Amino acid sequence: MPSDHRAHAAGADVCLVLEGTYPYVPGGVSTWAHDLIRGLPAFRFALVHIGAERGQPSKRHYALPANVDSLSDLYCREPLSRRADPASLWRAARAEYRRQGAARRPSRVLAALRRLHLETQVDADLLDDLASGDLSVGSFLHGRSSLDVTMELCERLAPEASFLDFFWHFRSMHLPLVRLLGAQAPPAATYHALCTGYAGVLGAAWSHRTGRPFLLTEHGIYTRERDLELDRTTWIQGSRGSRRADQEERPLDSVTASCLRRVWGRFFRGLARCAYARASTIISLSEISRRRQIADGASPERTLVIPNGIDLEGLQQRLARGPRPVVPESRAVRVGFVGRLVPIKNMVTFLRACFLASRTVDLVVRVFGPLDEDPAYVRRCRRLVASLGLGPRIRFEGLQPIEAIYAAIDMLVLTSFSEGQPLVVLEANAAGIPVIASDVGACRDLIEGRDEVDRRTGLSGIVTRLADPEETAAAIVRLALDPALRHRMGAAGRERVATQYRQSVTLARYGMLYGGDPWPASAGASSA
């Protein structure tokens, strides 16, 4: 594992376990993690990043703060020891199965994986088996016990599915976990994962091995996001093991595809239960997310709401030093999207809404966000822009400084399928810009207020139905035609951020948790 920093001999104060985010991917959770580390300079951090495969991504987006002692990279996929096509791997698995014979007992990890699919409760024994890390990649790929478990789970969970298709998907979902559980835990006083999934299980296993506390923060609900991906995915369409290397991909029949989606969803929910079972504190960003965690198996008494906050003074200084707000030569109203250009952000609804609104009002549209995270999706969005005839109105700006973004837009529109508590809404409101957002995560709290006192501040934007371009377009038109309303909503947003969403408060609460201080009993489920 490459590392640029030397860890203290006694270990870090906090080991952050991250999956597909900081320090390689900009925005969202990554910005939050960077601000957390910088904002708590008294704590030393070890970072463990879980990526898809070596070299993806290859470049850091953030310079690591001085209080980061180490950065380790783990990968879900690694090259096998020899190049092999699916048929030869299948033959090797059968040969190993015959060689080992029926007497070999399953490893503890394999027994835990079996229970993860068949049971709805996670106990200390299951965590103990997972944390043992006693299953090697070779044994998982070629062992008789592994094949026995695969066959049993196929019969019990997906009897209608093709076994060969199930076999390859079973490998795909579990092989990353087998690799990760074999990794050595960086010494730390506390382990803190920023999602469930593979990162959550690994943090829970390391905590169980070492006896150190484990914290879990969910910015978005991982299982919900994976369910959304599974509903829309195109990768459950063919089986690598069902064809020769010279054959075309064979689409799955609808029954097998449905079975495999169900098994993948069950797997991700099992991972979440493992993280919930071990975590001493389970943190979400809003009450609606906290209720979802409880429905998914989290113990209510260990759940806690800590909203995100922003450095209001620092942001205002950056905005003041940035370019003056642009006054367009025409009467066009400037609509902005800020975020990652990936399917879960639902750019399709955003673009269709802009097209519908442009029939009524004059718009210019700016899309701010990295263009290289999902190039195929960006190409899809560009094709949609062209097909709708929006080319002259829409510009893809890529990554831009925050002060340049909010000087160039009159309203922010967010049409995501899933969110936690998006920082871009807080940033826009702090800049006095109203927000139109779909009703996901904490967006309604941010725009309308999360309690009676907060609601007296007034609306800072408009909440719309999920994936509804017509309703989103109507909201755009309403704000475009009423500058006074935009001003009132922008002022309400600025006040809400100043009174409810201070970064200093968020940092103080995490400092308490890292320091081992008990949470005040009067705080209840929410830290608000």
Image (cartoon, rainbow, N blue to C red):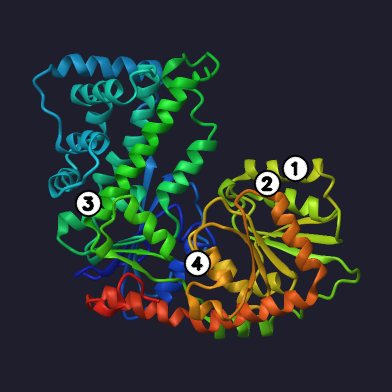
Q: Residue at x 26, y 64 (%)?
A: 302
Q: Are marks 2 and 1 in contact (CB under 8 Å)?
A: yes
Q: Residue at x 14, y 50 (%)?
A: 124
SS type, badge 1: helix
Mark 2 surroundings within 10 Å by alpha-carbon count, few (fewer than 14), some (14 through 19), many (20 or more): some
Q: Is residue 422 visible?
A: no
Q: Which residue, given by chain and number where applicable, does mark 2 sit on?
A: 348
Q: Which residue, given by chain and number where applicable, does mark 3 sit on?
A: 205
Of residues 119 and 174, the one drawn nearer to the viewer in this rendering: 119
Alpha carbon of mark 1 to alpha carbon of mark 3: how far?
Answer: 44 Å
Q: Quick one: label 2 or label 3, which is nearer the N terminus?
A: 3
Considering only vertical position in the picture, is 106 above or below 340? above
Instruction: Locate residue 121 relative to residue 367 in the image: left or right.
Output: left
Q: Which residue, given by chain and number where applicable, does mark 4 sit on?
A: 31
Alpha carbon of mark 4 to alpha carbon of mark 1: how far?
Answer: 30 Å
Spot occupied by residue 49 in the image (x, y as percentages of width and height): 38, 55
Three-letter residue code for mark 1: Leu
Of residues 280 and 480, the one drawn nearer to the viewer in this rendering: 480
Q: Are marks 4 and 1 in contact (CB under 8 Å)?
A: no
Q: Quick one: label 2 or label 1, which is nearer the N terminus?
A: 2
Instruction: Locate residue 223 relative to residue 499 in the image: left or right.
Output: left
Image depth: mark 2 or mark 3 in front: 2
Q: Which residue, given by chain and number where applicable, does mark 1 sit on?
A: 384
Three-letter residue code for mark 4: Thr
Mark 1 surroundings within 10 Å by alpha-carbon count, few (fewer than 14), some (14 through 19), many (20 or more): some
